[in-house]
Amino acid sequence: MVTQHAQNLEEDFARLRAKLSDPMFLANKGIGNEVGFFVFPYDAAREDEVRARTAELVGLSDEGRLPCRIVHRDLWDVFLQICEKEEILDEMSGLEADEGSVAFLEDTQAVVTPESFISEMDYESHEPGKDVLLITGVGKVYPFVRAHSILENAQHVFEDVPVVMLYPGKYDGTQLHLFSSISDGNYYRAFNLL
């Protein structure tokens, strides 16, 4: 028996898949002068199911079974890549114990900035009309970086391709609420995909 919640998640991913197959969506048409940024909110308690369904979507893209190329960026993986490049990854566990949580967070945020995330996420040869940037891992990187900061900094780099952020929480078109309880900042330029 399929529960109502499972059915809704299935329906939500069916809507996402339909968007990923829509030529107007892929061409960033029909949204005025706005950048094609979209938030796909979901119940954070369903994280494992969302990850599995996301892997299926990326697999379909990799197999050429979708009309788009999904360029997937997990923010946690990006965070680790930046820390490795900055040569701070091995030291991080001891730093929090030595400095305390607040100082550790501030020191990490000084190195691992929203701009560094976008730089690490960027890739050569964006293919407008074909590519979709899919961002996941928002909850895993909180509080090191916030979703609205990623979206704000991505606007000029990814303005030529649709960007979809899978978001474990709520988005009302102006305010992001991580895990449906933490105010994660205002962001007005994204469209709620659901």
Image (spheres, grey):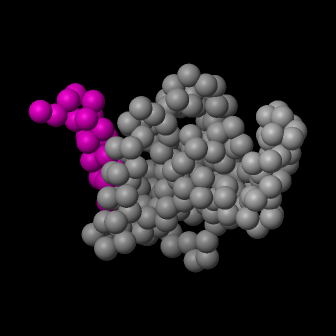
Position above or below: 128 against 116: below
Q: Horizontal and vertical percent for residue 103?
A: 86, 37
Q: Horizontal and vertical percent for residue 5?
A: 27, 30
**Residue 81 falls in image quadrant:** bottom right
In the rendered image, which quarter contains the C terminus? top left
Query: Is residue 18 a member of the stretch shown in magenta?
Result: yes
26 relative position to 182: left or right: left
Position above or below: 28 against 96: below
Q: Horizontal and vertical percent for residue 58?
A: 38, 62
Depth order, front residue of 56/191:
56
65 relative position to 43: left or right: left
60 relative position to 113: left or right: left
Q: Residue furthest top?
A: 181
What is the magenta segment's predominant secondary structure? helix
Depth order, front residue of 112/14:
112
User: Residue at image x 80%, y 64%?
Assistant: 87
Where does the magenta region start and end? 1-21
Position above or below: 186 against 77: above
142 relative position to 7: left or right: right
**Residue 73 falls in image quadrant:** bottom right
Q: Residue furthest bottom?
A: 125
Is any atom of residue 156 visible in this view?
no
Query: Is residue 180 a member of the stretch shown in magenta?
Result: no
User: Residue at image x 25%, y 35%?
Assistant: 6
Is any atom of residue 173 visible in this view?
yes
**Residue 143 falls in image quadrant:** top right
